[in-house]
Each structure stands twice: as C-alpha cells, then as structure tokens.
Image (cartoon, rainbow, N blue to C red):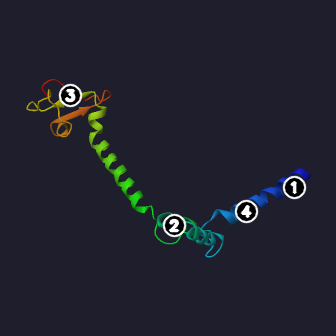
Amino acid sequence: VLMLIIIALLLAGELTAGIVLGDFCAADAGPLNALASVMESQVDDDEAVGMMSFYATCQGTNPLSAYLDTQQEAVTNMTDILDSYKDLFIHTNMCCDSAYDTDNIDPDTVADSCTFYSASNPSACTTNS
C-alpha cells in the first residue's frame, strides 16, 4: 500500500510538471519570452532569432511557412502526377484505338487513345475492340 501511495504521488508530480511545461502557448509572459530575449541578445542571426521567438512564444508569423508551403505544393504536384499515371503503371492489358502507334508509346498521350485493364478485370479487351 505504501508503494502504491508513493507511485501515485510521483505520477501526480509528473502530471503536474507535464501540464505546466507542455503548452508553450499558455503563458503570455514567462520563461519562454525570457528565453527569446536571451537568444536575441546572444545571436546575430535574425532568421534564427525569429524562428526561436515564434516557436517559443507562438506569436507572429511562422518563419518556415514559405518552406512548408513549397513542400506542400511539391507533394500535391507529385500526387497529381502519380494519379494521372496510375492506370498506366498498374495495368496488365491495354486496348488502344487502331490509329494509335503502340510501338512508340508516349506516357502523356496514351491515356487518350487507350483503355487500361488490370489482371482481375473480367471485361479486359478482346482482339479488334
């Protein structure tokens, strides 16, 4: 029983410390603003100071938002490209218009002239369709 009480007190202390230290945005003035001031006085790099101030005080504009936006655009672009080529990458059968030259396939135009079927698709094309 004594061990249970000791563990409960330790857990209560740990939980209290976690709540106090866990939310950086909770305090308007406090150690985080002091930490940002020390950083400003010791470092000559404005970008680093701005980043430290933003993440310590949660006020102002995120200095990394331009980088994050660029990366999000790149991921969206990659997703769009992969979505447009998905049928080409996973097909096992391909039926094309008779005018389409299948000896010289262009990935950018093949979807306009051909229909793609997976191996599990029972309606895969037949000859001359």
- Could you tell me which secondary element the residue under label 4 belongs to? helix
**Tag 1 and tag 3, C-beta contact below 8 Å:** no
Q: Nearer the viewer, mark 3 or mark 4?
A: 4
| Cβ–Cβ under 8 Å for marks 2 and 3 | no
Residue located at (18% from left, 30% from top): 95
Q: Point out the frontmost of discs 4 and 2.
A: 2
Counting from the top left corner in percent of width and height, residue 88 is at 26, 35
Closer to the N terminus: mark 3 or mark 4? Answer: 4
Instruction: List the residue tagged with mark 2.
Output: 44
Could you tell me the amino acid type at mark 1? Answer: Ile
Above or below for 94 versus 76: above
Q: Residues within 10 Å of mark 1 (few under 14, many from 20)?
A: few
Question: Which residue bears the numbered disc 3?
Answer: 125
Q: Which mark is residue 123?
A: none
Q: Are marks 2 and 1 in contact (CB under 8 Å)?
A: no
- Tell me whether the residue at label 3 lies in contact with that at label 4, contact meaning CB atoms closer than 8 angstroms: no
Q: Earlier in the sequence, mark 2 or mark 1?
A: 1
Left or right: residue 126 versus residue 24 is left
Q: Report how far apart the C-alphas of labels 3 and 4 lie in the structure.
A: 67 Å
Q: Earlier in the sequence, mark 1 or mark 3?
A: 1
Q: Is residue 48 visible?
A: yes
Residue on which the image places disc 1: 5
Q: CA distance from mark 2 to mark 3?
A: 68 Å
Residue 112 x %, y % = 16, 40
Q: Is residue 1 visible?
A: no
In the displayed structure, 33 sits above or below 13; it is: below
Q: Position of residue 87 (x, y in %)?
A: 28, 36
